[in-house]
Amino acid sequence: MTKEALRTFDEAGLLDTAARLFRQKGFAATTLREIAQAAGVLPGSIHYRYPAKEALLVALMDRAIERAIAAVRTAAAQSSDPTERVRLGLRAHLHLLLSGDDGVYVLLYDWRSLTGRARDEIVRLRDRYEAFWDGMLYEAAGAGRLRPGVDLKLVRLFGFGAANWVATWYSPDGDRTPEQIADVFWSYMALGLLSDDQRAVTPANMPAPEPPSPPSPSPEEGR
Amino acid sequence: MTKEALRTFDEAGLLDTAARLFRQKGFAATTLREIAQAAGVLPGSIHYRYPAKEALLVALMDRAIERAIAAVRTAAAQSSDPTERVRLGLRAHLHLLLSGDDGVYVLLYDWRSLTGRARDEIVRLRDRYEAFWDGMLYEAAGAGRLRPGVDLKLVRLFGFGAANWVATWYSPDGDRTPEQIADVFWSYMALGLLSDDQRAVTPANMPAPEPPSPPSPSPEEGR
DNA sequence: CACGCTCTTGGTCGGATGACCAAGGAAGCG
DNA sequence: CGCTTCCTTGGTCATCCGACCAAGAGCGTG
């Protein structure tokens, strides 16, 4: 019996509970007493581990982003085809977001609640995740799979937007699984919505072709 | 001088201020005293008009959604071409979201803060906006502009996601205007990302073709 | 068994919050 | 000029929050 196994305190369960409540009501509207009661511990016990409420949020987001990176990396490793890797990564991202991990949702939608250095730290982690995606897209573009002139960073941002927004409308009772949603989105994004006879006649508003730029190591400007 | 003009109280300014603060810190983390001070009134004066903090949020969201509907309707009316109408609507939506109206942002990202009947009311208004978009997409599909088998509701949801997410990363200092972003998104969505020689060989994962269904009057399931 | 360490218990504390209100203008009307 | 209506003022009030802590329980170890 190791020392680790002796810890009766369910730290993961506490974070799960907190994530669920934060998702339901938002960070600011959730009290420590609520979390403690829902998790079956006393408020003081939370304070012993996390000196402030914000630390709880950071720990929860940290865990969520590590999970996301691991899940997408594992999924993408299933194939060596650049475009297929993107599709598999998208599936994994949506599966994690929609199938139970409230932490990912909180990470995406509640990070306004962070302040100062805590925010910086999470942003840094999130940038790592985004850089990982940029790398996959860059490979696909480099392999000639993508239309010339496509802005990879915008593609990633649009894709993240559409995918992350699914969490606001997805229902487990619906008639599509997260994976199906991912595949449909991927097919729309890959092939476009216009029918073949319309593709030629429509003014594309496509920006001038530019060679795909390598994923930039610099963080997003602004934000 | 009408009675209306005599009202010295700047109700619109109050809502603007509240929207700005809600956007910055979230609804729950913003206090009535903060809003009052930033708007240059006393807390009691807010209470006179809005019996509860939530009523302020509802009023603000109500105004935002009316603005959004009006802006998109006006923009789309500039053209009678179904696909062009969609593009113009997208431009208007993004312009409103990115160029100053914090209320739209709050509407999109802070509606978890609403409870009970207040939430129902906003959802009802939001459904109207979505139905308007569904109508435009239905027209485009009916005119044969869209690939057969495209699920219009999913297209709207994906589009909303990508567009609304822009608010989380857009910076006025960036090198693209909201309109340019809208056009790029539209071109990617319309034509797809894959290069022409890849379109045929890629497994599309496209769902079986189905006739475009008319926009359903029923509200979203779930949520 | 007794020591020592980790973690829990049950409570306190200052401060802030949303809601509320009695009293007092200020403007327009008759 | 006095009345009425509308709105502001300046404050109160009960409640609740996050943070904190002294005391002690639990438990493996020596």
Image (cartoon, coloured by chain):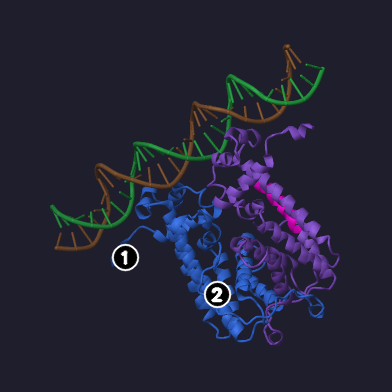
Chain colours: A blue, B purple, C green, D brown
Tell me where residue B7 appears, x and y as whole percent: 72, 33
In the rendered image, the quadrant that contains the C terminus of chain A is bottom right
In the rendered image, the quadrant that contains the N terminus of chain A is bottom left
Q: Residue at x 65, y 66 (%)?
A: B162
Q: Secondary structure at mark 1?
A: helix
Main SS class of the magenta portion in the image: helix
Left-right relation of B94 to A72: right
For discs 1 and 2, the disc positioned in front in the rendered view: 2
Query: Which is nearer the eye, A56 or A142?
Result: A142
- Corner quadrant of residue A169: bottom right
Q: Amino acid at mark 1?
A: Glu
From the viewer's perspective, is residue A118 above or below residue A201? above
Instruction: Inspect the magenta stretch and tell me whether residue B129 lies in it.
Output: yes
Q: Secondary structure at mark 2?
A: helix
Tell me where residue D26 appears, x and y as whole percent: 27, 53
Circle 2 residue: A133
Tell me where residue B78 appears, x and y as whole percent: 83, 62
Contact? badges 1 and 2 (CB < 8 Å): no
Label at residue A4: 1
Q: Residue at x 36, y 48 (%)?
A: A44
- Report the magenta residues as a range: B116-131
Left-right relation of B20 to B92: left
Disc 2 chain ID: A
Residue A15, can we see it?
no
**Label 1 – label 2 distance at C-alpha:** 35 Å
